[in-house]
């Protein structure tokens, strides 16, 4: 595939980077990335990946846009209130970059559809807001050996890590189980500074591009923690857990299952 | 000098908004219980029956205590302890609450 004049201009600031070049930009154009959740994290991550020219970008979300989302979910607007979020994000990303094949998947991801949804993609981005889906995505990515860039946010703090199944630890090596439902407050109760998912989603997009390009050190085996109030970025190590229930030596989890809905009540 | 303990945002309301507090050297579990005397409620959110909860990790100088001596891991003056909960857009440390 050769770039058109217009594409050369559009991606010129990438192509000029020795670490990217025409070759790297072609890798980006050929990449297929799936983002779960068109919310606080999925919007900025998808926005930057669309701008970067990722060839195929799928967004999975079955929610509709509400006014209270617009404080942080920057791919949506008052024009797309009540519209499905994946569809709303698709419109925004296509307006930014028509090169990108944006696929809106208006489904709620679950144990029955996840493997088929992610199978054809190179990299998965977790931008979900609840534990059941987070663990489900991790387990499915481990089973299909899909690289996963995971991000999470709360109030003024965010966490990011890249999971490369077979090469490094998974999310269950980090936190074996989700917290019990009783200890999880609602999203409304917890709150989040609107720009925080912007920072974390942009970090996720950065990790995706690095994986596509094969450049730099992937954020594997480490959890990056951002504390907006204290202005701290710190990393802690995630050792691979031999007893991990999904990627350890004797995995107990061999099939996908959905956690009870109570877990979802955030 | 003491042990520096990094408190995650969801627990900072128990420490009067402080993101870093000072603890006493010893084992991790004694450090947590000691902090609980100063900041009541902290221990039960991090541990249960003397064991660190499974959705909370404790790191000493970036190393996960689960791969050292767990609750019995010794910390000394100058060590930095981080308490890191699993988060997912909601939170984990609040008491049971409505939507």
Image (tube, coloured by chain):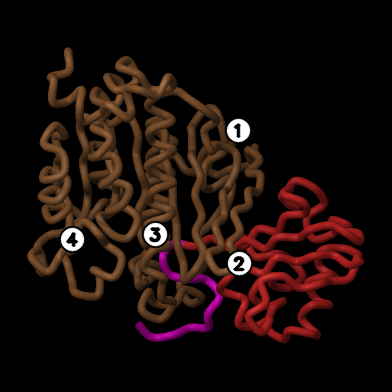
Instruction: Using the image, name the chain to which the residue with label 1 belongs.
Output: A
Q: CA distance from mark 2 to mark 3?
A: 16 Å
> Which element carries disc 3, helix, strand or loop?
helix
- Picture residue at 28% right of the left edge, 31% below the top: A121
Residue annotated with mark 3: A197
Residue annotated with mark 2: A230
Place of residue A53 in the rendered image (x, y in percent of width and height, measured from the top left): 23, 32
Q: Are marks 2 and 4 on the same chain?
A: yes
Residues at circles 4 and 3 in contact by the CB criterion of under 8 Å:
no
Mark 1 and mark 4 lie on one chain; the one further toward the N terminus is: 4
Image side of residue A68 versus residue A189, left or right: left
Image quarter (top left, top right, bottom left or bottom right) of the N terminus of chain A:
top left
> Which element carries disc 1, helix, strand or loop?
loop
Q: CA distance from mark 2 to mark 1?
A: 39 Å
Residue annotated with mark 1: A249
Residue annotated with mark 4: A76
Image side of residue A104 versus residue B80, left or right: left
């Amino acid at each position: 595939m050769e770039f058109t004049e217009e594409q050369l201009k559009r991606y010129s600031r990438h192509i000029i980077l020795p670490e990217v070049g025409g070759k790297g930009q072609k890798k980006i154009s050929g990449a297929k990335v799936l983002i779960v959740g068109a919310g606080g994290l999925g919007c900025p991550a998808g926005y930057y990946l669309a701008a970067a020219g990722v060839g195929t970008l799928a967004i999975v979300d079955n929610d509709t846009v509400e006014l209270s989302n617009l404080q942080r979910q920057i791919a949506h607007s008052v024009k797309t209130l009540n519209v499905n979020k994946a569809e709303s994000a698709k419109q925004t990303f296509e307006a930014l970059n028509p090169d990108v094949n944006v696929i809106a998947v208006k489904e709620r991801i679950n144990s029955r559809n996840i493997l088929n949804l992610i199978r054809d993609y190179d990299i998965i981005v977790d931008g979900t807001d609840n534990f059941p889906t987070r663990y489900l995505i991790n387990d499915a990515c481990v089973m299909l050996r899909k690289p996963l860039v995971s991000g999470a946010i709360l109030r003024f703090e965010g966490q990011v890590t890249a999971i490369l199944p077979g090469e490094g630890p998974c999310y269950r090596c980090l936190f074996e189980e989700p917290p019990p439902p009783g200890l999880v407050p609602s999203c409304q109760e917890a709150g989040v500074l609107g720009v925080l998912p912007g920072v974390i989603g942009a970090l996720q997009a950065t990790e995706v591009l690095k994986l596509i390009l094969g450049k730099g050190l992937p954020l594997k085996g480490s959890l990056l923690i951002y504390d907006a109030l204290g202005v701290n970025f710190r990393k802690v190590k995630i050792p691979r857990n031999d007893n991990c229930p999904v990627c350890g030596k004797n995995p107990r989890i061999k099939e996908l299952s959905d956690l009870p809905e109570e877990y979802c009540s955030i | 000098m003491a042990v520096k303990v990094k408190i995650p945002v969801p627990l900072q309301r128990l420490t009067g908004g402080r993101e870093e507090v000072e603890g006493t050297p010893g084992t991790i579990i004694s450090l947590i219980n000691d902090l609980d005397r100063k900041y009541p409620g902290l221990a039960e959110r991090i541990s249960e029956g003397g064991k660190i909860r499974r959705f909370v990790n404790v790191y000493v100088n970036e190393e996960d205590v689960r791969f050292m001596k767990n609750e019995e891991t010794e910390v000394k003056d100058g060590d930095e302890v981080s308490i890191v909960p699993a988060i997912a857009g909601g939170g984990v440390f609040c008491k049971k609450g409505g939507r």
